[in-house]
Amino acid sequence: MILTICGQESYVSIVVYHLHYGNIEEIKSHTVANLNNLGIEMDLTLYGMLYLDESDNININIKIKNFKQKLDLYLSDAATLARSLKDKGVNFILITNNLLAIKESKNYHELDLQIEEISFTTQVPPGIKFYSAHFKLDVFRYLATLASKYVGLCDLDMICINSIPECFLTQISQKKPLVYDISDQVIPAYGKDIITRDIECILGDKSCGKWYGGEFIAGTPEFFSMLIYEIDQIYDRYITNIDKLHHVGDEAITTAALEKMQQNGSEVIDAGKLKIVGRFWSIKVLHEQRSFDWYKDCFLLHLPADKKFLASIRQKTFIDVDEFAKEFQSRNSWFAWLKR
């Protein structure tokens, strides 16, 4: 079995398969050096995407004045995510369509980021909401070409707050794809009928009405190859029905494609239930949200309403999750409002 971890002193709990006997033995609290001595190599790389287009002036969940400010903000968010993952021993690579623009940004030389430029070919109607997010489909296509054993795509407004959990390592070792089921967030907000109708419009078939978040998806390159195949089958139907949908963007397309894969017998694992990822809103929402304490156990925390906070801590290392939580709550007016 080959797993992935990068870094020198990261502590992990890992599941080792004895292929000869077929049994499982847990080896806990080994440093990377110890794992290497055991002949175990980590092979998990997480990616983020920064698609740059100056004409895309629709900003979601953030108030920013211009393109340069937007670029600096998202680069700082990427640096925060990369640093937090590196502290836990996980490699992160930022994918972009415009490396030159990034290199010309004011903070580029202060950022510890590994960046790759790829070709983006998805045809996206200009001026729509989540315009740039549609280009995640090109990243899926890229991930499908890699020789890596296990890869994933994360939104940039996220932070790693805990060590990589054993349940994540188990999914990697078993080559199980991970997705984030957020049906409990979108159905209370929009209704089961609307969610199901939208997926069926894209699928051209019946739907069970599950909705998957776009902030985290992971699996083998083979999984992403199957995913992009299904996306290619439905993308034209998505564009045709785009004006009828309650939500446009990568989530709608990916949700429909994942359902088609499951109808064809593929298995996906909900990373949310395993607390590998969690989405927390520090604004008023239309669903019943768990307390922030519940999210403190997650490996990756998505904070879509707190991009500026995440950017501000890109050079800060937290001793533990409680120190991070204290900083986050002390600087966020949402928690003060809750106490009123």
Image (cartoon, helix red, strand yellow):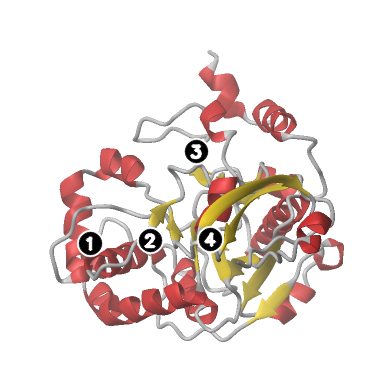
- Residue 96 in the image: state x and y as whole percent: 63, 75
- Residue 50 in the image: state x and y as whole percent: 61, 69
Question: Depth-wise, is mark 1 or mark 3 nearer the camera?
Answer: 1
Question: Depth-wise, is mark 3 or mark 4 nearer the camera?
Answer: 4
Nearer to me, 318 or 247? 318
Q: Which amino acid does label 1 sit on?
A: Ile
Q: Please name the residue that numbered disc 4 is placed on.
A: 21
Q: In which quarter of the image is the N terminus?
A: bottom right
Circle 2: is it few (<14), some (14-19), or many (20+) Cα within 10 Å?
Answer: some
Q: Is residue 158 above or below residue 18?
A: above
Q: Which numbered disc flags the more N-terminal residue, 2 or 1?
A: 1
Q: In this view, does 18 lie above or below 54?
A: above
Q: Is residue 1 above or below residue 269?
A: below
Q: Please name the residue that numbered disc 1 is placed on.
A: 199
Q: Which amino acid does label 4 sit on?
A: Tyr
Q: What residue type is labelled 2?
A: Glu
Nearer to me, 155 or 338? 155
Residue at x-position 68% and y-position 64%? 42
Q: Which numbered disc flags the more N-terminal residue, 3 or 4?
A: 4
Snapshot quadrant of residue 101: bottom right
Q: Which numbered disc flags the more N-terminal residue, 1 or 4?
A: 4
- Residue 31 in the image: state x and y as whole percent: 80, 51
Q: In this view, does 164 lie to the left or right of 131?
A: right
Q: Please name the residue that numbered disc 2 is placed on.
A: 251
Q: Distance between the residues labelled 2 and 1?
A: 10 Å
Circle 3: is it few (<14), some (14-19), or many (20+) Cα within 10 Å?
Answer: some
Q: Is residue 221 above or below residue 15?
A: below
Dot 2: element? helix
- Residue 74 in the image: state x and y as whole percent: 65, 59
Q: Distance between the residues labelled 3 and 2?
A: 17 Å
Q: Distance between the residues labelled 3 and 4?
A: 46 Å
Q: Is residue 99 left or right of residue 231?
A: right
